[in-house]
Amino acid sequence: MARILKTSGSKSIPPKRRRVLRRTTDHLDERLIQLQALHRISTLINSTFNLEEILKVLTDSMARDLDFDRTGVVFLDRNSQKPFQSAYASFTPVEFRLILEHYDSLLLPALDKEDIFIETADNPPPQWAHFLNLLSAMSVCLLPMRVKSRLIGFAIGVRNHRLMHLSDDQRRFFSMFVSQASTAIENARLYEALGQSNLTLEEKVQERTRDLLQANTRLLELDQIKSNFISMVSHELRTPLTAIKGFIVTLFHYDKEISEEKRHLYLGVLNEETDRLTRLITELLDISRIESGRIDIQWSTVVVPDLVQRVFETLSMKAAAVRFEKNFSVDFPEVFADSDKLEQVLINLIGNALKYSPSDSRVVVRGRRIDDEVEISIEDEGPGIPESEHEKIFDKFYRQDNEINRKSPGTGLGLPICRTLVNLHGGKIWVESQLGQGCKFKFTLPFNLDKAGR
Ligand code: ADP
């Protein structure tokens, strides 16, 4: 290191003055070395935001510039205030673990006490004597790192064979060193936190984008369903009305010319088409009542097998080629339910089973008790429903796009109405099916009074 003042060629200077000059020169030399060290450290630690690298630079610099034989730097966790990340040089891992083990009992109180804490083997308190002994050290120095008076970490330096006494200048230098270190560590930590929050923000943006895309897809689906509904309702209303109008016009204008047989046939068609209109309007009214919450359950005791039998009889006119069967377990209890609503559910489900059944097949209604619920299933041998549609068929106005549906009319409201009615009873409804293997529509009803929500 170049000295600042030349001392050679100063023979003419009186000895006392020369001594003063030498002291000043030495002092200035030391300050210069310290300043250069500070500059080097600050350049190094400010060139990165990587905490690990900064800790490493600091330990190396403590050995080199602060003249320690063994060094370590510890960064504390912001919340727990416990050692979180550290780097050390020349300590063995066992020694460094000892240091960390003594953090709470010995080091923390010392760090809280002083800005630069030094303990030497020269008559130390017993705990410190033991600590120095464990580390085989003559002096230990602790440098607390603070940001706005909050302790964020500390540096520890050990001298193996020398007692350590710091001059005021050295103290100032140590303080500046540690303040540089604190700022660098805090910046790195903030940078890490910023990176983390950027990441979280990015994840959130991606998540929201996914949600929006899903919502958009759903809206497009709903839009499609709505358009289907409008065209379906217009078609469903117009078809029977056209037939009704046509036959009424015929009967009105050609009353006298029409044979009794034809009149009977026309009235039959009028009857059927009016039924179809009534059914459509009833379903539309049901769904609108359900949606506006204007639906009441009239609780009473219901014998489900009897109700099923009644539905079989109602539908039997349309079921010439299909066999209805019912199979209820002997312990099947009476349930508390709204008889009319339950009948409506059964008519929809058994009616669907019938609609999709090939001729000469069976529709079986089974009932059994499971704990304090009953489970009723309606099984058919029709085309079945692929798994991807199992939930969709319970959406309002949803109809599968297939041959049977294209030929036979329907609103896509039957199953959503069933689901709402079953749910109002405190039960669940679902379908078990695979394409080509028939359907099992199942629903449960609690027969326990509390569960029925009365
Ligand atoms: P709709 O019968 O008026 O079309 P639903 O809500 O009752 O309306 O049924 C919705 C859709 O579920 C039907 O269009 C049909 O595709 C399918 N589905 C319902 N029951 C059955 C069944 N037993 N077998 C096959 N598909 C069925």
Image (cartoon, rainbow, N blue to C red):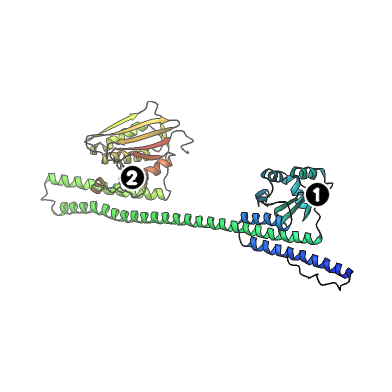
Marks 1 and 2, Cα distance to the nearest angstrom? 89 Å
Amino acid at pointer 1: Thr
Amino acid at pointer 2: Gly
Q: Which residue lies furthest to the top in this view?
A: 330
The reply to whether residue 150 is in sight is no
Residue behind mark 1: 120
Quadrant assignment for ligand 1: top left
Q: In which quarter of the image is the N terminus?
A: bottom right
Crowd class of label 2 (few under 14; some 14 to 19; many from 20; radius 10 Å): many
Q: Along the horizontal axis of the image, is 341 left or right of 134? A: left
Q: Along the horizontal axis of the image, is 62 left or right of 199? A: right
Q: How many labels does the image show?
A: 2
- What numbered label is drawn on residue 193? none
- The residue mark sitting in front, 1 or 2, is 1
The residue that appears at 29% across and 38% down in the rendered structure is: 438
When the figure is inspected, residue 292 is found, relative to residue 374, above or below; the finding is below
Residue 4 percent across, percent down from the top left? 76, 69
Residue behind mark 2: 414
Residue 425 percent across, percent down from the top left? 43, 39
When the figure is inspected, residue 302 is found, relative to residue 153, above or below; the finding is above
When the figure is inspected, residue 122 is found, relative to residue 173, above or below; the finding is above
